[in-house]
Structure formats: C-alpha cells, structure tokens
Image (tube, rainbow, N blue to C red):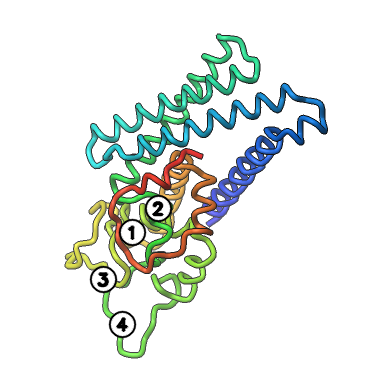
Amino acid sequence: MDPIVDALQWAGDLAFQQVKSSVRLAIQATPIYGAVTGDWEGMLRADAQIGVQVAVSYASMGVAKIPVNTLGGILGYTAAKGGIGFGSAFAKAAINGASLDQALGAGIKGAEYSAGYALLSGTWSAATNTDPLSASRMNNTIGTKLTEKLKPGESPSGFAAGSPFSNFLYSYIPFIQSVSAIHDWLGRSYGAPGLLNTGANEAGLQGRGLGYEISKFTPANIALMIPATVWTYGAILDRGLITYSIGTMAVPPTGQWNPSGVNSNYSTGF
C-alpha cells in the first residue's frame, strides 16, 4: 500500500503548491499589492498572467467538447491541448521578461506536458465515458464488487464495495472514487454499484477481460490501483486540478451512476 499512499501524498502536495501559486498571483494582481510594495510592474505582470489563464480556461472548455470515443478524437484532443499548453507557457514566459528563445523553450515544454496530460485524460474518458470530477460525484463504487448475492440480513464488509470502509473513503476522499472508475475498467468490473462481478459477466460490466483474470488475485487487484492512480491524476491535471479540488467540495453527489460523457464545465484546465 505504500506506493499508493506516497502517490496520494504527492498529489496532495502538488495540489497545495498549485493553490498557493494561484493565491499569490491573485494577490499580486491587486492595486493594494502595487500600492503597498510599490511593485506596479509586478502587479501588471500578474494581471497579464491572469488574463492568459482566463483565455486558457475558455479554450479548454471549448476543446473539452471534442468527442474522445475514437482514436481520432483522442489525438485531436491531445493536439489541441498541446497547442493551448504551448500558447500559455510562451505567453507567461514572455510576460515575465523571457527572451524569444527562452519563451519558445517554455512553450515547447508546456506543450509537451499539456499533450501528455491530455493523452491520459482522453484515454481515461474514452474508457469510462465521463471525467474524473463527474465520476467522483456518482454513486460509491470504491471496493471489490461482490461475486455472489449476499444472504438475507448480510451487508458488505471489509474491502467490499458499499462496506463501512468503502463508504468512509467515498465520503472523505473523493479522489479514490475517481480512481475506482478506471481501476474497475482495468479489472473488467466497471459498472453500477450492486452488480455482481462473475466470470460469465452476466451484468455486462465493462473493461479489460485480461484485467478480470488478474484482479481475481487480491494483491494484483490492489496493485492495479497504482496505474489507476497515475492515470486518474494525469486526467485531473489536464481537466484542472483546482477545478477538481473545488468541485469535489462544492458539487454534491448526484445519487446516481450515470457516465454520460465529459462535462466541459469541469474541464477548465485550471
């Protein structure tokens, strides 16, 4: 479990750094900052960077409407987000006084990161038919799906989906609910809560058949959380880490399991 815990801690630290950077930029963009520090040039640079971020957010929400249910759609989405990443990084570097060569270098690096995250995000959504924030607001799917019906009076326990432990994670760590979507797909158990995960797959659960065979071995099923965590976090970075963080607190659970495509409003890139 240590790699999973380390990944969650890294994700939390990165989220904190991004929020801290955004708050600092927002403060620097105010006339109060300029008046108190006398750094009016710094205030104008901050204002310009916020303008770039607003433009990126609008562009990202527009690009999020590209269907990613085909290879062409995924590649088109990845290319578009790479272009946005280049423009954003180039503009911010130029605003902060970089030379043309330095700004171009920053733009290329920004394009590489943005395209990489977009590829993870596009394939994540192609597999799950939703986005990480929407998935986190759906009904609880954290834990192992049952393979046979419970006896009368029994309730899920241990690591089973719907157990007290599962419900605790769902209520307090929504990121794990997002991870469970692609984890279940990897293990051919992606589907609504309560469906039985049998070898014959009478419930029509979605995902990789080979993954189902792997996931029957409990340590291997737990190990699938590692690529699922990385994949999900990359998708969140593409759609917008701060948007995801605020959304999991501000958007109430839907009370349904209904993966119906990407919500472009949750894809600000910010």
Q: Which mark is residue 215?
A: 1
Dot 1 and dot 2 residues touching (CB under 8 Å): yes
**Residue 135, position as x, y percentages in the image:** 38, 56
Image: 115 above or below 14 = above
> Element under label 1?
helix
Residue in the foreground of this view, choosing between 252 and 157: 252
Find disc 3 in the rendering and name its residue: 196
User: Please, what is the three-letter code of the amino acid marked with disc 2?
Assistant: Leu
Image: 6 above or below 38 = below
Name which of mark 4 and mark 1 comes first in the sequence.
4
Q: Which mark lies nearer to you, 1 or 3?
A: 3
Name which of mark 1 and mark 3 comes first in the sequence.
3
Name which of mark 3 and mark 4 comes first in the sequence.
4
Bin the neighbour count of mark 4 within 10 Å (Cα to Cα): few under 14, some 14-19, many 20 and up: few
Dot 4 and dot 1 residues touching (CB under 8 Å): no
Residue in the foreground of this view, choosing between 200 and 100: 100
**Residue 142, position as x, y percentages in the image:** 41, 64
Report how far apart the C-alphas of labels 1 and 3 lie in the structure: 14 Å
Tell which residue pokes out farthest to the bottom in this image. 153
Q: Residue at x 24, y 42 (%)?
A: 69
Find disc 2 in the rendering and name its residue: 224
- The quadrant where residue 177 appears: bottom left
Report how far apart the C-alphas of labels 3 and 4 lie in the structure: 10 Å
Q: Residue at x 17, y 67 (%)?
A: 202
Horizontal side of residue 114 vs 26, given as left or right: left
Find disc 4 in the rendering and name its residue: 150
User: Please, what is the three-letter code of the amino acid marked with disc 1?
Assistant: Ser
Name which of mark 1 and mark 2 comes first in the sequence.
1
Image: 93 above or below 28 = above
Report how far apart the C-alphas of labels 4 and 1 lie in the structure: 21 Å
Residue in the foreground of this view, choosing between 175 and 260: 260
Horizontal side of residue 150 vs 87, given as left or right: left
